[in-house]
Amino acid sequence: MMQVFDNNDDFRTYIPVNVGFDVQLLESDIDTAMRKYILPYCSVEQWLASKTSQNAWDTELVSIVKSAAANLGMFLYLPMAKVSISSSGVQYEVDRGRQATAEDKEDLSLSLFAKGMAQVEDMLKYLEDNESNTNPAKFQAWKASTAYTVRNSRLIRTTAEYRIIDSRQVFLSLLPYIEDVELDVIQDLIPETTLQKLYSRNFGTDNTKKKAYETLLYKYVQPVVANEALYRALDQLAVVIDRYGTLTIHDDTSANKAKGSKEASIDKIERKKIGLQTAFHRRRDLMLEFILKNAAALDWEIPSEPEETTGPYKNHIEHGSAFFGAFGR
């Protein structure tokens, strides 16, 4: 089992429990919180490396992780607090009249979960903010882990690039849908060699071509992927849209309900989907127009009389896509 806190005093730094509280009571729940909510994002390797490091950035990361683990561990432990399970059944260990009310416990549970997940979000932001080539020694274990490399293999790599969402956790939940859209939509519109340039972001030194590729990726391809991926996810994941319009996605409905959150209404989700589809089609059409106007800079050959061409068009490097065939129809 993973040891996160050195002792009770270390734990009390993050949650103001009574002096008599023993953090060992939460040992299993803290371990679960680490493995379920925290380590999938920062990696086991980075946690172990940072925990034994004296670097200032590692110390700060450990502090953020501990805060998240304390709140989420307590959140998981709370239903078992003051309960005794034996062959006689489940019993309260103290007189019920002295316990907090069900409403008090629910409020505390929601607060612990919200604080814990906010710290997970802070952890992701801290890792991203310190992802710098000026100091490549920072968080090397994270950069070498799947927690980092999986997202960096996509056309949209960060929440900032996604633009229509704010949460890094939502963004990471959307990665499978981003991949699906890349396979189902983008690969049918953009030839393989161009697509590989967009994935690698190696656009060469020619300023005209570099600008064309950057515009294609950031202004057109990313919004197309972002809107369609979120559209698909809304049917599959538990979704919460609060009164301020903030969208949250959970991996399953039961987990969402356990957090005391109510899913967004069907009407709200459908309105959101209509907006996403409208944006998707508009951006896709604008992307195709941009491709036609900038074919030379993108190294694509478009026949002077496309109506006489039946097969996919080729660019200077041998490849084709379904998009080019559309010009002859």
Image: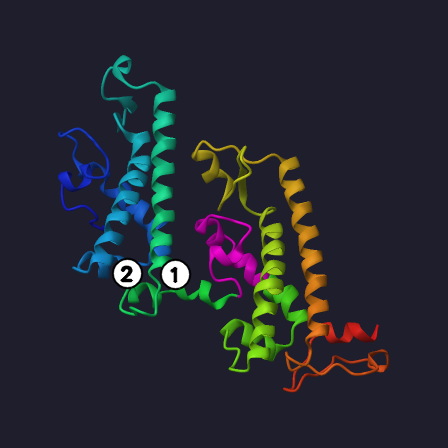
Residue located beneath label 2 in the image: 46
> Could you say where residue 69 lies in the image, as x and y percent from the top left?
28, 44
Q: Nearer the viewer, residue 110 or 293?
A: 293
**Span of residues in magenta:** 155-180
Q: What's the residue type where badge 1 is placed?
A: Ala
Q: Residue furthest right?
A: 308
Q: Picture quarter containing residue 218?
A: bottom right
Q: Are marks 1 and 2 in contact (CB under 8 Å)?
A: yes
Horizontal side of 19 relative to 126 (left or right) equals left
Q: Neighbour class for label 2 at 10 Å: few (<14), some, many (≥20)? A: many
Q: Residue at x 30, y 19 (%)?
A: 100
Q: Earlier in the sequence, mark 1 or mark 2?
A: 2
Q: Residue at x 69, y 72 (%)?
A: 291
Horizontal side of 302 relative to 253 (left or right) equals right
Q: Is residue 178 magenta?
A: yes
> Could you say where residue 272 lies in the image, as x and y percent from the top left?
64, 43
Q: Residue at x 32, y 40 (%)?
A: 72
Is 226 drawn above or below residue 253 in the view shown? below
Residue located beneath label 1 in the image: 147
